[in-house]
Image (cartoon, helix red, strand yellow):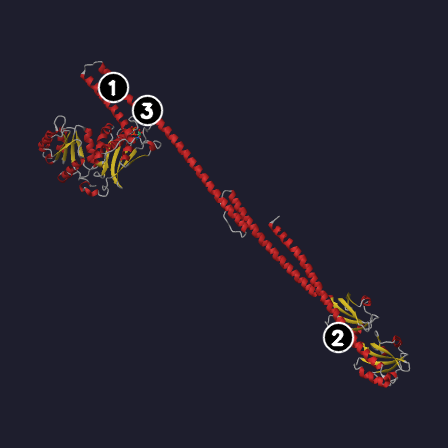
Amino acid sequence: MKTRSYLTAIILIVLAPLLALSAWGLHLLLEDEREARLAGVAEKARSIALSIDQELAAAEGALRVIAQTEPMRREDFAPVYDLMRKTITSADSWGVLYDADGRMLMHTHHPYGTQFNEGPNPWVLDAIARHRASVSDLRDGRAGKSKVVSVQMPVTTAEGRQFLITHTFHVSHITKLLLRKDLPHSWVIGVFGTDGVTLARNLRENEFIGKPVKPKLYEAARRNASGRIPNVTREGIEAYTSFTHTSRAAWTVAIASPMDEINSPARTATALAALVLVAALAFAAAGIILFARRITGSTRLTLAAAKTLEVGGIPEVRPSGVVEADLLQRALNEAGAKLARENEARRALERERETLLASERDARREAENQNRTKDEFLAMLAHELRNPLAPIAAAAHTLALGVKNENVVRRASEVIVRQVDHLKSLINDLLDVSRVTRGLVEIEKEPVEVAAVVASAVEQAQPLMLAHRHTLSVRADAPQARVLGDRTRLIQVLSNLLNNAAKYTPDGGAIALEVELREGEAVISVRDNGIGIDSELMPHVFDLFRQAKRTSERAQGGLGLGLALVRSIVSLHGGRVEGHSEGPGKGSCFVLHLPLLAGEAQQPAAVPALAHGLVPPVRLMIVDDNLDAARALASLLEAKGHRVSVLPDAPSALERSAQEAYALYILDIGLPGMDGYELARRLRAMPGAGEAVLVALTGYGQTHDIDKAFAAGFDHHFVKPIDVEALDRILAKAASRAILVAAAPI
Ligand code: ADP
């Protein structure tokens, strides 16, 4: 059943008894009202009856007085006549004297002595026979012209004769009595005699006087002293007819009051009550609709909230105007919020578990990878260690044969020494990496010039580059920049990168080394156009033992330790290293970031001569039979913008000097054939080169060596490795007077 129906039922249950009760009450009230009105009517009837009685009583009283007067007793009618005239004054009533035969003897409307020739009136005999005063019913007047009633008094004279004196009223007199009462015009008031014939009427009296009343009324009046009957008047109006009797004449006074009039207040009250009822019902219906809407609306909102909860949402609280529904909504909202929190917590737990699972999976995969890498490494280590053993074994066997040939013995010994050196370096690498990666190595930091590190690293990598006929270009924007670090370790790092570039680049490749200063860091990059690194290996390239698959291109591979070492050492310096490659065959680039010495970055112009413009480019020559070393130094100097020629011996140097002018010469002393001293002397003697700055570079640094050098014409003397900063100063000085290089491309 719908809420609306329930509400209707409630209203009806409450209203029905109320309505019944008020209807009953109203009915009682209306009955009372009706009864009161009818009682009023009856009262009026009694009042009229009383008026008639008074009139008749007065007439009877007067007649009684006349009857007892002396003239009457003596039958002296003249004074009786006068008395009658005096007592009966109204125009529509008169006095008459009859004799015992019923003959009229005198009439107050006629002069005394008038002879009346009318026959006897039989009713007179009846009236005399009663021996007391009586009132007649309606009868015809003289000659039947009018309708009259009379009060009649029999008189017995002294002679014993009987007479009748009457006070006769024209019926209009009675009617006047009725009209004298101020009664509603709608009422029909009638008076009828004991014979049921109407003798007075307030309406249409001419029509109805002398006619019998309705038998129903007559019967009721005959049976009861007073009463009321429903009736239809002669005018055809439905009415309540109240009747009562006059006491002297036993006439009946009847008043017909229209039912409409009596019932109209009842009807009005009923209509009003019905109106009130309808209004109450309308209010109730409106209330039902309103409340039903409220209740169904709140139910709908609660239902929507429950649905939201069902799908895991947090239901909103939307005020519905129904407190209980709002409370329910609030409870649903709180339940939703709680569920959401629990769901969120559960999801977070699930996420955490998944993350844990994933990281555990990753860790396991990584462990497996490391294990596999370790196995591969062990296999490779065995291979790498076994490699030198074959030539050593062969050389040892050769020696064991006791061969006397000096050359053979020397070569076998050299092989053994070289291979043992190789084995030593492998083992050193291994130990080194193990100590560094375990954090057992402490680096001793001091300010180190990046350019010096670059020069030394280039020098170390030079042989491999030469062997592969690679072109190395070096560009250093800020060769004066310094970092705080361990010079040897930094050289090891950079040479490692250069060696890798040389190893993993097919012969004749191009390798570029660049140094630039960026945001407080020295950024050193080593780029090659070699075999490149695929994206799978790249993220792991700095891990221990990680290598690409060995192929003929990668035959040079080491033990996979180098980059791990690089990363550890660089991080010990507070720096970092990155590797980039666009993929196999597309070359690689490794970039070192080292924090500059505090204040260096902000004061790049501290050594203006060495700033970006560098030392003005100088054309110079290096003469050294150790071409690797010479080229490395040349690369460094070229990186600084100088134009460098490298020559292996004195004759070729002299020859070149004859063709070109050089501002500075760096000469190795221990040259084959003509040594450095001699070369210096010859150069000094040459017209073009005589002004040049001569720098001796030697492994011998004792005083007499230095003296010997200066004696030979050298301006400066350096013990290997060369002090780059000092050399820069010499170059700067030389630049002021020397032959400059117009443009010094690297
Ligand atoms: P190793 O060179 O002894 O194998 P590294 O740790 O120096 O060990 O290098 C790890 C691996 O990274 C190398 O085996 C090689 O596969 C790859 N790699 C390093 N540098 C380069 C480069 N410049 N070009 C291509 N591959 C390189």
Separation of disc 3 and disc 2 at Cα? 152 Å
Task: Mark 1: give few (<14), some (14-19) or many (20+) Cα within 10 Å.
Answer: many
Left or right of residue 341, residue 48 in this image: right
Left or right: 168 in relation to 36: right
Q: Residue at x 79, y 77 (%)?
A: 55
User: Which residue, given by chain and number where applicable, does mark 3 sit on?
Assistant: 378
Q: Amino acid at mark 2?
A: Leu
In the image, 429 versus 166, the foreground residue is 166
Q: Nearer the viewer, residue 319 or 233?
A: 319
- Classify residue 49 by image quadrant: bottom right
Q: Position of residue 595 (x, y in %)?
A: 26, 39
Q: Residue at x 70, y 61 (%)?
A: 27
- The relative height of residue 243 versus residue 422 in the rendered view (above or below) is below
Estimate how packed mark 2 is, as few (under 14), some (14 to 19) or many (20 or more) residues with alpha carbons within 10 Å: some
- Decide if residue 305 is on the left or right side of residue 44: left
Provide the residue designation for mark 1. 392
Question: In the rendered structure, which disc, 3 or 2, sits on the residue that comes first in sequence?
Answer: 2
Residue 466 disc label: none
Q: Find residue 179 and name its label.
A: 2
- Picture quadrant where residue 259 is located: bottom right
